[in-house]
Image: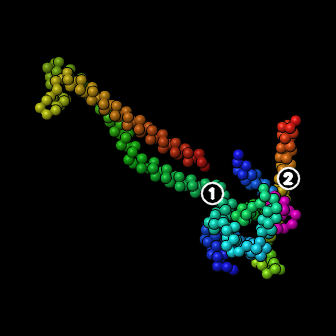
Amino acid sequence: MNIDDWKSQIKRGTLEFGILLMISQEPCYGYEIISRLEKWPILSVKENTVYPLLRRLLKEEYLSSSWQETTEGLPPRKYYSLTEKGREYLQCMKTEWKNLLSAISDLEGKENG
Amino acid sequence: MDKILNDYLEKVDKYLKPMKVTDRMDIIKEIESDMAELREHGGLSANEIIDRLGEPKKLAQAYLGETITETKGMSFRKLGAMIAFYSMAGLGGIIILPVTGITSIALILSGILCPLCGLVKLLASFVGYDIPFIGFQLGSFSASPALTLILSIIVGLVFAAIGWGLWLVTKAYIRAVSAGSEKIRGRK
């Protein structure tokens, strides 16, 4: 049984959704995203996954970014926020997610009944 | 900033060479910011930070992988495959195909001609004429017209068999070359 393979495939698809959901609440910076995702092992990721992914979402214009100074004397942080295009994208993802969940729950129902 | 971390960033920057300078600067600045957060809020030491970030090359590759589009990456690989393929097909065009192709045809023709000549010599001997330039000679031994026909049939069969074999090789080579080119074209 190799559940890890399956988990990493699930993660690959849902991570983007999770990150966009998080950014849709409020602008976030990379480290913040990584440390907040650590709460859920299935979604927890490291820098080498999150930053390149954020960069791709920027290139695809689902996200915009701006550098902001910190008050703690740390280097500036790059904040990401959702663009209008990103909002539409996220909306489509939510619909598909609901479709997936209802499909799975239908299938589970058949299995149990 | 620690020397360890600085060196790490320099290496990542080096591996990001294929990207635009502005993109590279932005990436490095963001990793630098992440390092500061990991130290201040994550409580990690410089060594723990670079452990967490992983090999500089791997990290740079992750960026390049997300940035360079799939098709562009393929075209580089495709170019390599094409160069290898056409240089081989080119060599084949110059050496392999002419040698195997022409030799094979020549051998098959000889295979047919040889028994014919033997037949001619035998027929000529029936009317009392010896054709001097057709015949088998081994040292002082010279085959009679009847033996010449038999020998010429045997030699003709051997020639034809070798020629046919070479023809099969030629065909197989052409098929391999065109299969290779289909494979490359198919990947477009």
* The residue positioned farthest toward the top in the image shown: B126
> Mark 1 highlights which residue?
B72
Q: Quadrant of the C terminus of chain A?
A: top right
Residue B43 horizontal/vertical position (percent): 76, 74
> What secondary structure is marked by label 2?
helix
Residue B121 horizontal/vertical position (percent): 20, 24
Residue B96, above or below B67: above
Q: Is residue A39 visible?
A: yes
| Callout 2: chain | A
Q: How many numbered circles are shown?
A: 2
Residue A23 magenta = yes
Magenta residue span: A18-28
Task: Name the amino acid, label 1.
Answer: Lys
Distance between the alpha carbons at the discs numbered 2 and 1: 31 Å
Q: Mark 2 packing: few (<14 Cα in 10 Å), some, or many (20+)?
A: some
At horizontal 62% and vertical 75% (from top left) the residue drawn is B7
> Mark 2 highlights which residue?
A94
Residue A74, above or below B64: below
Task: Name the amino acid, label 2.
Answer: Lys
| Callout 1: chain | B
Residue B71 horizontal/vertical position (percent): 64, 54
Query: For residue A72, which quarter of the picture?
Result: bottom right
* The residue positioned farthest toward the bottom in the image shown: A73
Q: Is residue A59 visible?
A: no
> What secondary structure is marked by label 1?
helix
State whether the magenta stretch is mostly helix, strand or loop: helix
Residue A103, above or below A61: above
Residue B50 magenta = no
Q: Mark 1 packing: few (<14 Cα in 10 Å), some, or many (20+)?
A: few
